[in-house]
Amino acid sequence: MFLGAALAFGASVAMAAEDAPKSAADMKAYTQKISNTEVAFDMVPIPGGELLMGSPAGEKGRADDEGPQHKVKIEPFWMAKHEVTWEEFELWSLLMDSKLRKFQSIKATPLDKKADAITKPTPPYTDMSFGMGKDGGFPAICMTQHAAKKYCEWLSAKTGHYHRLPTEAEWEYACRAGTTTAYSFGDDPEKLGDYAWFAGNSNSEEDGKAKYHPVGKKKPNPWGLYDMHGNVAEWVQDKYEPDFYAKFPADKVAVFPICQPDTEYPRVARGGSWKFEADKARSATRLASDPEWKEQDPQLPKSAWYMTDALFVGFRVIRPMQPPSAEERKNLQLDAVLPSDARERVTIDE
């Protein structure tokens, strides 16, 4: 359930002023390069505004957990244009960043040293793409929400800019991009194939099997974000509660709502995937994580890092215009907090 610190009405969450534009008008799209590597990713400015979150009762394919609709105030942020790719993710998860510096005899900068201090996962027991491909811009998959949040911590340290997962509300706001229809392009699921990889079009030309695809190959939404519908579902900050929306007063605007998790399950992923039907790719659809997502994991206890059976789950990052203070990051659990029922095994970089 949400904590009092995580939900407010009619006032903004206070933020620290370090390294932030003076106003939302100063926010521009930019490319973030990862130092000492050839890896880079694009960030798109998302204007602040108000979201009518959830779906109307008459929307085709609607589930009960998508209502009641309620208003949410959203502060400006940047969002990654694409889902995090294997090229990005493995700089952290496989220690490729530090290994590349050692190979090239590059001295660690202060930012490198901070990034090196972030916990890394144990090596995976198998290829976590399960043969679907890594090179060429494929989205990283099969990580837990905890791992995705740890990556964000590493990325923040590495770049000097604070990054995190979006909240459910921020994700839906960015996905809708000012629209109120079932999808960001309208209500007609017959048009989904132009914007998304889903069960209806994800079969590979090579072997005919359904799989994920390289990011950015379909049309973007009105704000220039790719694959918000389909390809891989995307982790957000929140715990899944089917009746969470019912907690909001109908006559007030919620500010920074977040359903703070404690145990590992269930947590929320958004956007549908290459494996799911069209109705699961709607802007309001919510997906709850499940222990079955680790069914093949041979470890006991199960890994805190990998979702061996969640070949349909990845994530993308955001950067708030106004970064939170250290106290807010802690109180709102914006950074990785090991679930109370999980154990973290780590890799030590020697």
Image (cartoon, grey):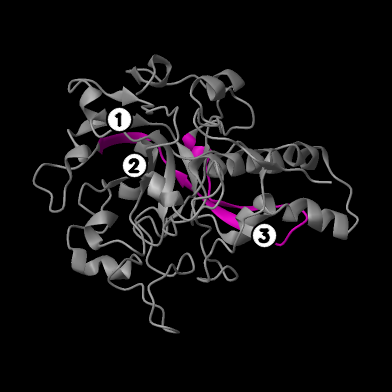
- Dividing the picture into quadrants, the one containing residue 336 is top right
Q: Secondary structure at mark 2?
A: helix
Q: Residue furthest bottom?
A: 206
* Residue closest to the eye, 267 or 201: 267
In the image, residue 127 lies at what x, y percent?
A: 59, 64
Q: Quadrant where the N terminus lies? A: top left
* Separation (CA) of disc 3 from disc 1: 35 Å
- Disc 2 crowd rating (10 Å Cα; few below 14, some 14-19, many 20+) is many
Up/down of 97 relative to 206, above or below: above
The reply to whether dot 1 and dot 2 touch (C-beta < 8 Å) is yes
From which residue to which does the magenta span run? 24-52
Q: Residue furthest left?
A: 58
Up/down of 111 relative to 137, above or below: above
Up/down of 192 relative to 20, above or below: below
- Membership of 181 in magenta stretch: no
In the image, residue 237 lies at what x, y percent?
A: 44, 36
- Which badge, 3 or 1, is on the more N-terminal residue? 3
Tag count? 3
- Disc 1 crowd rating (10 Å Cα; few below 14, some 14-19, many 20+) is many
- Membership of 48 in magenta stretch: yes
In the image, residue 158 lies at what x, y percent?
A: 71, 43
* Separation (CA) of disc 1 from disc 2: 9 Å
Residue where numbered disc 2 is placed? 173
- In the visual, does 275 lie left or right of 340? left
Q: Amino acid at mark 1?
A: Val
- Dividing the picture into quadrants, the one containing residue 102 is bottom right
Q: Which mark is residue 72?
A: 1
* Residue closest to the eye, 140 or 126: 126
Q: Amino acid at mark 3?
A: Val
Residue where numbered disc 3 is placed? 39
